[in-house]
Image (spheres, helix red, strand yellow):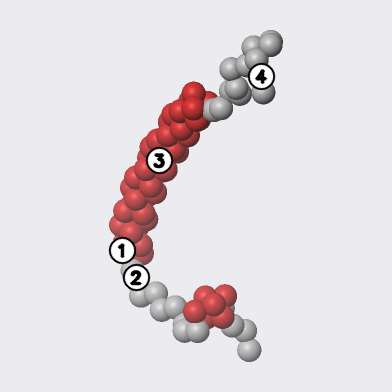
């Protein structure tokens, strides 16, 4: 007996009862949602990069550069 991957993973059979016209509408909606998610991902990626750069600049400014010792100072 053959078992579908869906049933093996989720322990129940997937029932799809869409007409071809409903499937076309769903695919159009799905395409729109994919575009929205792609744009969201791009915006999040840009924001994360910007934050990363600002944090890097902040910590580079605050980085300890060593003691201000001159020749002849007592240590």
* Mark sitting on residue 74: 4
Q: In the structure shown, which secondary structural element does the residue marked by tag 4 occupy? A: loop
**Disc 3 and disc 2: Cα gap in Å?**
35 Å
* Mark sitting on residue 18: 2
Q: Quadrant of residue 36?
A: top left
Question: Which of 41 and 64 lies nearest the eye of the viewer?
Answer: 64
Within-10-Å neighbours for mark 1: few <14, some 14–19, many 20+ = few
* Mark sitting on residue 45: none
Within-10-Å neighbours for mark 3: few <14, some 14–19, many 20+ = few
| Front tag of 3 and 2 | 3
Name the N-terminal-most of marks 4 and 1: 1
**Disc 2 and disc 1: Cα gap in Å?**
6 Å
Question: Which of 64 and 18 lies nearest the eye of the viewer?
Answer: 64
- In this rendering, the answer to whether 74 lies above or below 5 is above
| Front tag of 3 and 1 | 3
Q: In the structure shown, which secondary structural element does the residue marked by tag 2 occupy? A: loop
Q: Is residue 22 left or right of residue 42?
A: left
């Amino acid at each position: 007996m053959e078992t579908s991957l869906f049933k093996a993973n989720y322990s129940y059979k997937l029932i799809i009862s869409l007409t071809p016209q409903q499937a076309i509408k769903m695919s159009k909606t799905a395409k729109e949602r994919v575009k929205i998610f792609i744009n969201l991902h791009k915006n999040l990626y840009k924001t994360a990069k910007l934050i990363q750069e600002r944090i890097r600049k902040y910590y580079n400014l605050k980085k300890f550069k060593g003691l201000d010792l001159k020749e002849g100072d007592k240590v």
